[in-house]
Image (cartoon, rainbow, N blue to C red):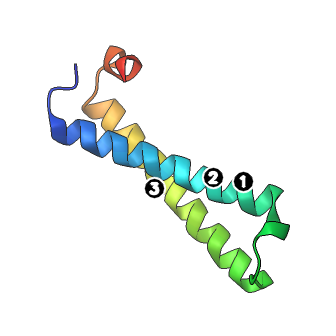
Amino acid sequence: MINTRLISALHAKATADKEKALMALDLMINNAVGIGDHTADDMMKDAEKSLDLLCSAEDRLTILETFFIEAEDINEE
């Protein structure tokens, strides 16, 4: 069991950030026409921002799951 609400909240935030980044990247890659006022430079900046968020979220999840959460706890969420 995740033994503190803090660890649980950190894990939930990292998971939400990962999903947000994946959603944004998916929209930019598969539905770029729907993104109105973006120039190529804006698109690149937004893609880099989303990629940075994804990397950060993955790193946070890995650290939390390696050092603070036992394997069976992840499956319970």
The amino acid on which the numbered mark 2 sits, given as a three-letter code, is Met
Residue 63 position, x and y percent, is 35, 40
Q: Residue furthest top?
A: 72
Q: Residue furthest right?
A: 33
At horizontal 78% and vertical 85% (from top left) the residue drawn is 39
Is there CB contact under 8 Å for labels 2 and 3?
no
User: Please, what secondary structure does the residue beneath circle 2 have?
Assistant: helix
- Please state, as top left, top right, bottom left or bottom right, where the N terminus lies in the image: top left
CA–CA distance in space, label 2 to label 1: 5 Å
Is there CB contact under 8 Å for labels 2 and 1?
yes
Answer few, some or many: residues within 10 Å of disc 3's Cα (few below 14, many 20 plus, some between 14 and 19).
Answer: some
In the image: residue 50, left or right of residue 71: right
Numbered mark located on residue 26 in the image: 1
Q: Which residue is mark 2?
A: 23
Residue 50 position, x and y percent, is 58, 63
The amino acid on which the numbered mark 3 sits, given as a three-letter code, is Ser
Numbered mark located on residue 56 in the image: 3
User: Please, what secondary structure does the residue beneath circle 3 have?
Assistant: helix
